[in-house]
Every structure is written in structure tokens, then in C-alpha cells.
Amino acid sequence: MEDRQAEVLVIRASPRLKVFFPSQLDGAGGIIRIHLLNISRTGALIYSSQPLEKGQKVSVGSGERAKLAIVAWVSGARAGVEFRLPFHEAELDAFIADQNAALAEAARTIGTLR
């Protein structure tokens, strides 16, 4: 029972933030478009129209903030990835800020925001 309680504490120590960001995943099959559905310091829930495999090594995001990860589970078009090295809080904040900025820039480019 103590082991299970320790697992729960670990899960709660890294709360997931609900997001909806278009992003990319780089794996053995090349770069594919994904959507990040939630993210924490230790992992993320993603949606991919391309099939992923449990145990697949991937990189989530792009540029200098891309994070190496392993696909922990797959259920249909959704998958959970575990980052090989957790984000520090400031890194996670910067990753989310970059995603927000990219989304805002894309919206301005196509004319949906003024």
C-alpha cells in the first residue's frame, strides 16, 4: 500500500496542464504533426493522426526546446509520452510560452487575429 501511495504522490507532484497546441513529433518515421492535449514536467498527452508505437523514441516540439521522450502508451489516436528528462518549471513555462507565441503568430498570419 505504501508503494501505491508513493506513486500517487509522484503523479500529483507533476500536475498536468490542459493545453491544445498544434506541434510536431520527430520519430523514426520523420516529422509528423500532432496536438498537445496536456503537458506536465514529466510527460504529455498527444493526439496524432499517424500511428505511434509504445516504446518508440520521439522528440516533442521543435527547436531548442524540443524534448526527447518515449511513447509510454497508445490508445487509438492518443498517446502518452514520458520525457526522458523532466522539464524544470521555468523550462516548462518557456515551452508553453513558445507554443502560445507560435499559435498567435500563425493566427495573425492567416488573419484571424488583428
Image (cartoon, rainbow, N blue to C red):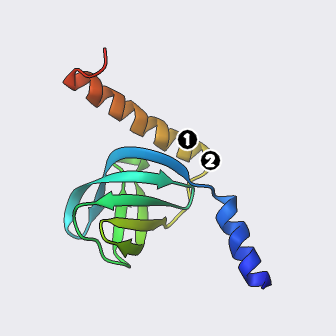
Q: Is residue 34 above or below residue 74?
A: above
Residue under the image location 78 percent in, 85 percent down: 1
Instruction: Specify the farthest residue to the bottom.
Output: 1
| Mark 2, secondary structure of its residue | helix
Between 78 and 60, the one lying in front of the other is 78
Instruction: Specify the farthest residue to the top.
Output: 114
Q: Residues within 10 Å of mark 2 (few under 14, many from 20)?
A: few
Q: Is residue 6 above or below residue 44?
A: below
Q: Give residue 32's quadrant in the image.
A: bottom left
Number of marks drawn: 2
Residue 84 placement (x, y as % from top left): 49, 67
Tag 1: amino acid: Asp
Between 34 and 89, the one lying in front of the other is 34
Instruction: Specify the farthest residue to the right.
Output: 2
Residue 98 placement (x, y as % from top left): 42, 37
Q: Quickly name the residue at label 1.
A: 93
Residue 103 placement (x, y as % from top left): 34, 34
Q: Is residue 48 left or right of residue 96?
A: left
Residue under the image location 60 percent in, 43 percent down: 90
Quadrant containing the C terminus is top left
Residue under the image location 57 percent in, 56 percent down: 41
Q: Are marks 1 and 2 in contact (CB under 8 Å)?
A: yes
Q: Give residue 16's quadrant in the image.
A: bottom right
Residue under the image location 40 percent in, 39 percent down: 99
Tag 2: amino acid: Glu
| Mark 1, secondary structure of its residue | helix
Between 105 and 67, the one lying in front of the other is 105
Residue 89 is tagged as 2
Residue 21 placement (x, y as % from top left): 37, 44
Q: Residues within 10 Å of mark 1 (few under 14, many from 20)?
A: few
Q: Is residue 108 above or below residue 101?
A: above
Q: Distance between the Cα atoms at labels 1 and 2?
A: 6 Å
